Image: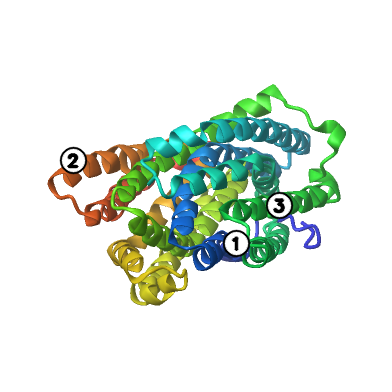
Amino acid sequence: MSKSSGTVLMTEGSIGKHILTFAFPLFWGNLFQQLYNTADSLIVGNFLGNHALAAVSSSGNLIFLMVGLFQGISIGAGVVIARYFGARDLTNLKKAIHTTISFGLLCAAALTVIGVIAAPKILLLMGTPDEVLPNSLAYFRIYFAGSLGFVMYNCFTGILQSVGDSRHPLYFLIVSSLTNIVLDLLFIAVLGFGVGAAAFATILSQLLSSSLCLRQLMHGPEEIQVRLSEIRPDKLIISQIMKNGLPAGLQNSIISLANVFVQSNINRFGALAVAGCGSYSKIEGFAFIPVTCFAMALTTFTSQNLGARQYARAKKGAVFGILCGISVSELIGICIYFIIPKLLFAFGSTADAVAYGITQAQTVALFYFLMAFSHCMAGIMRGSGHAAVPMFVMMICWCIIRVTYISIIVRFIPSINVVFWAYPLTWTLSAVMLLIYFIKTDWVHGLE
């Protein structure tokens, strides 16, 4: 495939080179995305104080709960597109691309309405502290008023990445991230606006990045070129997208629901706990970057190669990607364990708030490799058409067991440490279950 177009056929050539060269731009892209997510907290915390920082922090899990389903469906669309791309079925490839865009537009409209209307009730159910609630509600509603930007950005990048192009999404995300930081500083530090301005800066940046992605698709190679007149749903393609994407979306939403429950337990310890743990969650997002990169690379690599019936090659790529993912994420975890105090104080938090973040980091950071393994396995399973497997494993481990553990143990040991330990314990369970599945089953024939 043409280097200038960005598309890459992963069914031939060096396995390691394909996975690494695909994952490397994803790494930088996710790094910049995390930077502009963190910029909200850094600027809000330093200029507006702990309560405003807690408002931004407490909205994170709730936002992912709302968008997780649609992100999962975008992953499913990518699997379908990658399969047709690997099989060189250009007719269905074009149908899949245009169907994905039409479906994304419908999802964006639905998410806007649901997010804006449901925000107050959900924040109250989470037990958001009274002093934090007004700012949380403002941030949440403004963020979801701009659903079109981030939903379509996910759709467009999913299309580009499924055909092996991870470079152009990186370029567009860099532009978007820098724009977000500049707007944050302008709205909050210079003009003195409140927490809602941080959400407004984010949605403007996301609209910019989605527009750049659409432009790339409209002027890209003929085989994947988007034409506005052809944007319409195809029933067969939608059924394939839902088959591959709905389990991933439900998995995201179920995990997010469990994390919302975890957040509600953190909220009980007060605004300082919310601020400190929220600041740590921004830092933890950097540890998730290599996990996300290799999981996405494995989904695309697996789907393209199984579409081309390159079964042995898919297996080799799976092992290589898993080893890379767990090694890099664990190295980051070790670094975070030792330097977490300095990182947390950068958010402008008080010493009492920082203490909560340090405790959480030093409880979970050394177990990142287990979380990485589970996500990499989920990427492989989605790429092979077994998306329901990680959904059920993570639903059991990261939702049912995690929530049950916290609900029972916190009653007997009312300590925030109990909440923190829920993560490494459930990561261990999911890693063991997925490893057994990977070894004992013939997962490579899922797409057939």
Question: If the image is split into quadrants, where does the N terminus sit?
Answer: bottom right
From the image, tell me which residue sits under label 2: 408
Mark 2 or mark 3, whichever is nearer to me: 3
Cα–Cα span, label 2 and label 3: 43 Å
- The reply to whether dot 2 and dot 3 touch (C-beta < 8 Å) is no
| Labelled pair 3, 1 in contact (Cβ < 8 Å) | no
Residue occupied by mark 3: 204
- The relative height of residue 313 versus residue 303 in the rendered view (above or below) is below
Q: Secondary structure at mark 3?
A: helix
Q: Please tell me which residue lies in front, 74 or 122.
A: 122
In the image, residue 287 lies at what x, y percent? 45, 64
Q: Secondary structure at mark 1?
A: helix
237 left or right of 54? Answer: right
Colour treatment of the image:
rainbow
Q: Name the residue located 68 percent from the left edge and 59 percent from the top edge.
A: 173
**Can residue 51 be seen?**
yes
Residue 365 image offset from top left, x and y in percent = 34, 65
Q: Which residue is mark 1?
A: 36
Q: Nearer the viewer, residue 239 or 380?
A: 239
Estimate the x, y position of residue 181 in percent, counting from the top left.
Answer: 65, 65
- Amino acid type, residue under disc 3 in the picture: Leu
Q: Earlier in the sequence, mark 2 or mark 1?
A: 1
Q: Earlier in the sequence, mark 2 or mark 3?
A: 3
The three-letter amino acid code for the residue at tag 1 is Tyr
Q: On residue 130, which mark appears?
A: none
Mark 3 vs 1, N-terminal side? 1
